[in-house]
Every structure is written in structure tokens, then in C-alpha cells.
Image (spheres, rainbow, N blue to C red):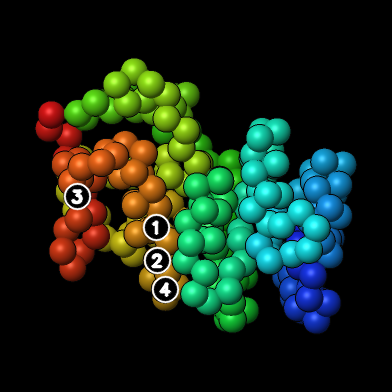
Amino acid sequence: MKRVLVVEDNPDLAFGLRNNLEIEGYAVEVAVDGHDALRQTQAQRFDLVLLDLMIPGVDGLRLLRAMRERQDRTPVLILTARGQEEDKVRGLRLGADDYVTKPFALLELLARVEALLRRTQPARPAGPVVTFGDVLVDPASRTVSVNGVDVALAPKEFDLLWALVESDGAAVSRERLMDQVWGYGADVLSRTVDTHIAELRRKLEPGREPRHIVTVRKVGYRLVRTP
């Protein structure tokens, strides 16, 4: 049975989330503030953390930072209020795996939880080291460097980059990337791919027009491996 920690200070929402997750077969604990969540994540292991960013005590972003700094790689799905685009981006940069915007559809949330849990331990891609421009990608160690300097990628950022590598220069649709990296069907609408692509570009091709991770209009993205 997969164990989920719900970090939510709204008692009605926390109850609803817990009830529906338990109906789906998950073992659920609830933390009502950041201090409680910090204690629980330090004391026991969870398979996924469902994290509201707007919580009292230690806020969600600080909690996420603390988890990642102590090398806790538990998948984290953050909940943000509509219009808090900056918080979504900051959460992804700190190592969150995905986000849902409030108010959200329950079925979409459950689909995202299921997909993250299913891909908690993805198989490591096999194959030789790949280079393009100043970037070196080592699939065996899941590491990336730019001009010889290691670049920290979140797990889903690496998975997304490798999906583009494996496409061998062909255009890949957002729907296919959503299915391949996150496990979502085309019926789940999300800007998750675009947000993660923006982060990859910021880390791998900073301060210039992207030459390698390029947009294919009305389709998706492709990786150009020429120097």
C-alpha cells in the first residue's frame, strides 16, 4: 500500500483529499502545518507528498527546500492557487515533480497522484554518454553538465530531456511527452511540459535563444544535437 502525506491546513479540503485517496487504496497521513509536515517527513518514509504551498508555520516552499537539501527525493505534488504562476515555477525549481492549480478536478488530481507513484522508480535509461553543444548527458548516472560544470536537474527534468534525446531529432508532441514522462493521457490538460522545458532551457542554454531544445510550432519540441 502506497503511503501519501497530505499537507493541508484547510480541514474540509484535507478531509476530502484523505477520504478520496483512501477510497483509491492509499494509506494517508495529514499534516496541518509546515512544522508538522517537517516532523513527519523526517520521522517516516512516504511514497508521495501532496503539498499545499500556503500553509502556516514553515511554508510549503521552505518545507520543499528542506526536504531536497537533506536528499529526500520523495515525489512532491504541489497545490497552488490560481494566478500564483511564480510559486509554481519556484516550486519546480526547488525540486517539485508536478503541480495542480486550485480549484482542481478530483479526477485530474488522482490521475497525477497515480502517475507520480507509478513512476517513482523509473528504469534508468541505457546507452552511451550523449553530447550536444556544451551539454553532456550521462544516462547511467542521470547526470548533466554544461562546459564541464554539473547542473542539477529535477528527476522529471532529466526524464523529459532524455525523452527528447531518444526522439533522435524528431518532433515530439506535448501529449506524447506527458504520457512518456508523467504517465498522463491526452485527456489531462496541463502546462507542465512547457514549464519544465523552460527550466531545462534556463539551466542548459541560459541567456540566449535556444539552439538545441527548440519549439516545433503547433506540435511540441525537438532536440537539435548539432554543435
For residue 57, what is the image quadrant? bottom right
> Residue 189 got which mark?
4
The local crowd at label 3, few if under 14, some if 14 to 19, many if 20 or more residues have their Cα within 10 Å, is: some
**Residue at horizontal 23%, vertical 54%?**
221
The local crowd at label 2, few if under 14, some if 14 to 19, many if 20 or more residues have their Cα within 10 Å, is: few
Quarter the C terminus occupies: top left
Could you give the CA–CA distance between mark 3 and mark 1, rounded to whole angstroms? 14 Å
- Badge 1 marks a residue whose secondary structure is helix
Q: How far across and how far down the image is residue 38, in percent?
A: 80, 48
- Badge 4 marks a residue whose secondary structure is loop
> Residue 195 got which mark?
1
Amino acid at dot 3 = Val
Identify the mark nearer the N-term, 3 or 4.
4
Horizontal side of residue 225 vs 179, given as left or right? left
The local crowd at label 4, few if under 14, some if 14 to 19, many if 20 or more residues have their Cα within 10 Å, is: few
Q: How many marks?
A: 4
Could you give the CA–CA distance between mark 2 and mark 4, rounded to whole angstroms? 7 Å
> Are the residues at dot 1 and dot 4 in contact (C-beta closer than 8 Å)?
no
User: Could one spot residue 168 in this view of the protein?
Assistant: yes
User: Could one spot residue 25 in this view of the protein?
Assistant: no
Horizontal side of residue 48 vs 180, given as left or right? right
Could you give the CA–CA distance between mark 2 and mark 3, rounded to whole angstroms? 17 Å
Amino acid at dot 1 = Thr
**Along the line of sight, which residue is nearer the eye, 48 or 36?**
36
* Residue linked to disc 3: 214
Identify the mark nearer the N-term, 1 or 4.
4
Q: Nearer the viewer, mark 3 or mark 4?
A: 3
Q: How far across and how far down the image is residue 145, in percent?
A: 36, 25
Amino acid at dot 2 = Arg
**Residue at horizontal 19%, vertical 50%?**
214
Horizontal side of residue 209 vs 42, given as left or right? left
> Residue 191 got which mark?
2
